[in-house]
Image: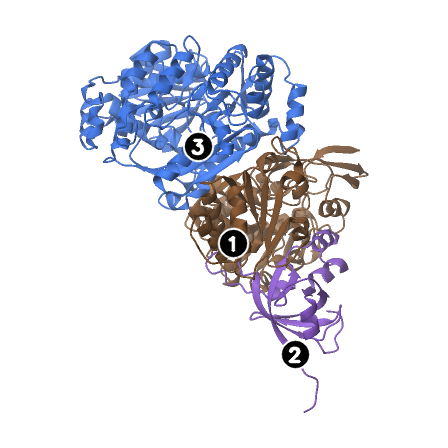
Amino acid sequence: MEDLKIVNGIVYDPLNGIDGERLDIHVSGGKIAERAKAQRVIDVKGMVVMPGGVDIHSHIAGPKINMGRRLRPENHRTAPVPKTDVTRAGVGGGLSSTFVTGYRYAAMGYTTVMEPAVPPLMARHAHEELNDIPMVDKGCYVLMGNNEYIISHIHELNKVENYVKWLLNAAKGYAIKAVNPCGSDNWKWGENVHGLGEKGVKFDATPKEMITTLSEVNKRLKLPHPLHLHTIDLGVPGNYETTLETLEMLKGKRAHLTHLQFNCYGGSSWKDLSSEAGGIAEKVNDSKITVDSGQVIFGDVTTMTADAPWQYRLYRLSGNKWVNNDVEVECGGGIVPYRYRKKNSVNATQWAIGLELLLMIEDPWRVYLSTDNPNGGSFTSYPYIIKLLMDKKFRKEELSTLHQNASSTSLPDIDREYTLGEIATITRGATAKSLGLKNKGHLGVGADADIAIYPLKEDIAKMFSKASYVIKDGDLVVGKGKIISEKYGKTFMLDFKEKVEPDPDVREFFKYYTVDIENYPVEMAYLPRYEAIKCG
Amino acid sequence: MKFEHVVCPLCGCLCDDLELIVERNEVISTKNACALSRSMFLNLNADLAKPLIEGKETGIEACVDKAIGIISKADYPLVYGLASTESNAQRKAVELAELLGGAIDSTSSICHGPTVLGVQMMGEVTCTLGTIMNQADLVVFWGSNPVDAHPRHLTRYSLTPRGLFTPRGRKGRRMIVVDVRETKSSKLADRFIQLKPGTDFEALSSLRALIKGEKIDIDPELKELAEEMKSCEFGALLFGQGLTMSNGKNMNVNAALALVRDLNQHTKFAILPMRGHYNVTGADMVFTWQTGYPFAIDFSLGYPRYGPGEFSVVDLLSRKEVDVALIIASDPVSSLPAQASSYLSEIDTIVIDPNRSMTSEIARVVIPTARAGISAEGTAYRMDGVPIRLKKVLKSPYPSDYEVLCKIVNGVIDGRSKDS
Amino acid sequence: MSGPVIVIVGFILITGRTLRQGTSLHLGKGSDEYRIEVTTVELSEHSMKKLGLREGDKVRIKSAHGSIKAICRRSNLPSEVAFMSCGYRANLLIGSDTEGTGMPSSKGIMVEITRETEEEDEV
C-alpha cells in the first residue's frame, strides 16, 4: 500500500458535487487523503476519473448461480479464459466463474458488487464463493419474503423484528431481500400469488403484509439499505397495475424496487404486451422509492431468480431446460436459459422499457443501472447501456433494428442524454449512498481509495468497458487497461449494537429444518476480511 | 470431554446432531451415530497412515518435499479424489491442477457423474431434504438402498420424521422401492417393484408416457405406480447408483429427470441423487464455481476444459495418459476397475490421506494428514447442497489436507522461480 | 463318459454398498471382516442348487475383463442375478470402458460363475 497521486484527470464525484473538474486525487494508507507524500504519480491527462463502480444488484455468488454454472457447460465452452501470470483461469460467458467475475468487474472499473439473493440456509456457500471473487468488495442480501417463520408470525412485529435481526446476523447478510413475497412459498404447493391481498395456500399471510412488515422491520432495525424488493407478478403481461399498487403501498416509506423493467408491462397477453414505464416512472418520481432498471440485452442469457413460479412459466414458454429448487422453510428458486431476440415483439419492448425507466425517472439518485445479471444480460453489458443513455443517436439507431413494437413505447420521443456526472451517479454515487456505504462511491477525503480512470473515447461503450487504471484500496490493480495485480476485497456485514440471540420461538421452529440451530449461523471464518456497518 | 452438534464426515446425509465423548484424544462413545458412523468414530486410529517414501517411514517434511519434487517434474499429472475432504482443500487442489496444467477429477465421475450429465441436458426439479421432511407424502427410492448406504436418511429426512405439513410422520407417507433385487430398504417399503436388470430406462420412460396420458401396454405395477406418483401431494424420487452405474448411465438419469419434470404438471415432485461421500457434492460445487465445470477437468491448455470420458479418472488411467497421480482423501485402487487402477502402480502415485488405503500401499509417497471433520475444520456440502461447517474434535500430529496442498503449491511455485 | 460335470451359469452381476462393507471398512481394508465381505457373492437358492453349491463354498466368477474367486452366500435374488459388495475384488471384473461418460459399467455385468474345484488356500 503506497501513497499515490493521480494528477490531471477530469473528476466526476457526484456525492461531493464535482462534475468534470480537473483535480488531483491523493491516496494514502488505502484511503483518499488530503495530501499524500506520493512516491508514485500517475498522470491521467485527458482521462475521466470516477469513484470505483458500485453494483447494487448482480447475481454472482451462491447456490443459484452455481447451479446455473453447472447447468450450462455449453455456455462456458464459448468463453474459455486462460490464466496469466497475474490472474487465474476460468470461464466467461454469461455465467462467469468466480475469478473471472472479479477480473471482469475490475476491467470495467467496478470495485464493489452486491449479491442480491441468498437463502440463509445456504449463506455459507455464498460467502465461500464471494471469497473466491477477487478485486471487489462485496456483500449479500438475505431472502426473507417467503420465510415460513416470518409468514407464520406475520402479525407479531416484535417477533419478526428479532428474527430478522438474528437471521441477518446468522447469514452475515447486508440487507433484507424479498422476492415474489409469499408467491414462492405458495409454489411449494405448485401455486403462486396473483394479488397483493391474496392469502397463501397453507398460510394466511398476504404479499402486502409481508412487504409492509419487512419494510417496517427494516426501519426499526435502522438498516443501511432499504427493503430490496422483487415484487409479485414479475414478467407477466398487465403487471403494471400490481406495480402501481406496490408503489402506492410503499408511499412515504423507504424501499428499493429491483429490476423494475420486468414489472412495467401493459396488455393482457404476450401478443399485446406494451410498455407502462411512463406511468410507473411518474409514480416513482412522486415518491421516495429507489429502483434499478433490469435492462435486457439481446442474446443468450441464463435467467435465475427466487421467483420459482415465474421460472416455471418461463420454462413452459421456452421449452428450455429448467432447474427448480424448493429450499426448506425459506424460499424457492428456478433457472431457465433464455435468448432475447431483437425481432421478438416482447423482447424488443422489454429492451425499450428498461431505457424508458432510466430516462424518464428524473432523479439519477433514485434510478440505478442494472441488468439483474445474468437475467437481463451480463454485467459486461453495462458500457453498452451507458452508451445508449448518453448517445441518443446510437439509441435511435439500435431501436430501428428491433421489432416495431419497441417503437410504440415512448422511447423514440425521448431526447434526453445522460451526462458523465449522471452516469457516475447511477453507477456509483447513488448506489453507494443507497447502500449506506459512507466510504464508497465518492472521492472525498476518508473514502476508500477505490478509483476508476477511463480513457476519454468517442465510443462511450469502449471507454467504459476498459478502464485504463483502477485503484482498489489504494493499490493499483489495473494499469494501461490490464490487470496488473490481483487482490481480494472485503465483505460487508451488519453491526448490531447488542448481541443477537434467537427467540425461543425460533428455536422451536428449527424442528422444521434439517440442520441444528447451533450449526446454522455462518461463522466468522467465512469473512476473512470484513467491515461491519453500524445499524442506526 | 463432550462434543455436541458434531457433523458426521462420512456419507451424503451429513448428519449434524452427533454427540461424542472424547477421552485422551480418542472417541470412546457416540450418540445419534448410525452403524457406519459409529464404526468410523470408534476406529479412527485403526489404520492411520504413516509418512512413507517408497514404503520406508520417514518424516512428513521429507515426504512433502519428495512430493513437490515429483509433481514439479510431471508432464501431465492427475489430481484426484477430494470427496472426503473439506472445501478449502478442494480449492487448493484446483489451484494446483491449474498451476501444473494437469487434470483434476473427483469421485463424482464414478458415482453421480452421470447425474450431472443428465442435469446438464435436462435441468432438474429438486428440493432440499427438509422440504421432503415437511411436505412429502410419497417417497420413491429407485436403484438406491438407503438402509445400507445412508442409514439415517429414512429417519432424519425422508420417511419417518414429522414435518411442518406431515404431522403423521411415517403413517402419512408411502414408500416405494424400485430395484433389481430385494434389499433391506425394499423390505421396509409399502410397495416393492422388482425390475429386470438393465430395464430402468424403459420403466422410467414408460412411466413418463403414462404421466403424459399415453395409452401403452405395460406391466400393471408400473401403471399403478404412475397413478400414485400423479396423485400424491408432494413426491420425491431419490435415486442411486442403480441408475448411474447400470447400462444407460446418464440416459437413465435423463429419463428420471424428465419424468419428475413432467410430473410437475400434475403435482409437486422433486428428484434428488443419493450422493455417497459426505463432500462429493462440495467437490462439484467448488470445481464449478472456480472453473465452470463440476468434474473431469483439464488445464493443459491454460484454461479449464470439461471432458467426461476424456479427463475423467478411469479414462485417463486406463489409457495411461498421466505420468503422476496425486490422490487426495480417496482410495482408487479399491474403488476403480482394476484395468484403470493398476496403472497407479506403474507411475508415481502420491497419496494424501489420514488413513492407510489400498492406494497408499502402492504409492511412491504417502503423506498422512489430519482428517477433515475429525481433526480439521472446513465446509462440507450435503447431498442436497446444504453447506455445513465440519468440526474439529481430535488433535492430530499431522497438517490438514489443505495445509499440505498449500505447501505443495508453494513448493512448485518456488521451484519454478528458482529455475527461471 | 467320466469326470465331474462342470456347470457354468451366466449371471448379471450387480455390485453395491452393504452395511457390513461400510462398517468393516473402518477397521481397515486389510481387516478380515472387510476382506470377507468384499469377496462374497450372493446367489439365489435356485442358482446355488444349479451350481451344486452350499453356503460358504468357493466359486469362480469370470467376466470379459477378469476372473476372481469368491465365497458364496444365499440370498433372496432373482435367479439370473448375482450380487457382490463393491470393492477391490468386484473391480477385477469391471471393465474400464466408460462409453464417454467417465463412469465404468459397474452394475449389470455379464459374468459366468462356476464352482471352484481346485484345492486352494484362502480366497
Foreground residue, A160 or A115? Answer: A160
Residue A335 x %, y %: 43, 37
* B343 over A56 or under it: above or below: below
Residue C68 x %, y %: 65, 70
Residue B415 is at least partly visible in this image: no
- In the rendered image of the structure, the colour used to display chain B is brown
Instruction: Determine the chain carrying the residue at label 2.
Output: C
Give SS at disc 1: strand
- In the rendered image of the structure, the colour used to display chain C is purple
For residue A309, the mark is 3
Instruction: Determine the chain carrying the residue at label 3.
Output: A
Give SS at disc 3: helix
Q: Which residue is mark 1?
A: B77
Foreground residue, A472 or C106? Answer: C106
Chosen colour scheme? by chain
Give SS at disc 2: loop
- Labels 1 and 2 in the same subunit: no
Quarter holding the N terminus of chain B is top right
Residue at horizontal 35 percent and vertical 40 percent from the top? A318
For residue A526, the mark is none
Closer to the eye: label 3 or 1: 3
Q: Amino acid at mark 3?
A: Pro
CA gap, disc 3 and disc 1: 46 Å
On the image, which quarter does residue B136 sit in? top right
Foreground residue, B116 or A407? Answer: A407
